[in-house]
Amino acid sequence: MLLAEKSTGHVIEVLDIHELFDPLKSTVKGSMHYGQEAQDPEHFPKSELSFPSGEALPQCWTDPDYRRKES
């Protein structure tokens, strides 16, 4: 899955999709696509990522208590 870094707009290829969906994980392993080649994998804070369209990540991916706030 491809996401974007909010501050720069650079494309990040998520390498572990399960980390992305897990609200208990605050970072996700990915590889930045910048320049001619994908860069070495590193961890990116989910709070700094969005969809390439600019839409925020779903709250259920980032907040383990998102359901408690509804009641």
Image: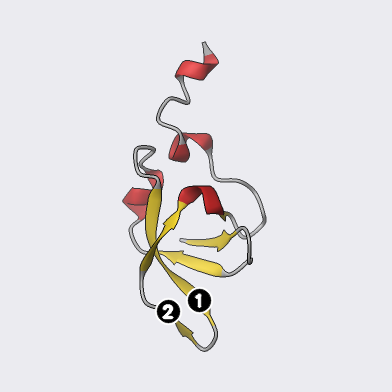
**Which residue occupies 36% across, 71% down?**
41
Counting other residues with Cα less than 10 Å from the Cα at mark 1, is it few (<14), some (14-19), or many (20 or more)? some
Q: Earlier in the sequence, mark 2 or mark 1?
A: 1
**Which residue occupies 39% across, 51% down?**
27
Residue with the mark numbered 2: 39
Q: Is residue 51 left or right of residue 37?
A: right
Residue with the mark numbered 1: 33
Q: Which mark is residue 16?
A: none
Residue 26, quarter of picture: top left
**Which residue occupies 42% across, 79% down?**
39
Q: Amino acid at mark 2?
A: Gln
Question: Label 1's element?
Answer: strand
- What is the residue that sits farthest to the top in this orientation? 71
Counting other residues with Cα less than 10 Å from the Cα at mark 2, is it few (<14), some (14-19), or many (20 or more)? some
**Which residue occupies 37% across, 77% down?**
40
Q: Amino acid at mark 1?
A: His
Q: Position of residue 19 (x, y in %)?
A: 34, 50
Q: Nearer the viewer, residue 26 or 36?
A: 26
Above or below, comparing residue 36 to residue 57 in the picture: below
Above or below, comparing residue 34 to residue 13 in the picture: below
Question: Label 2's element?
Answer: loop
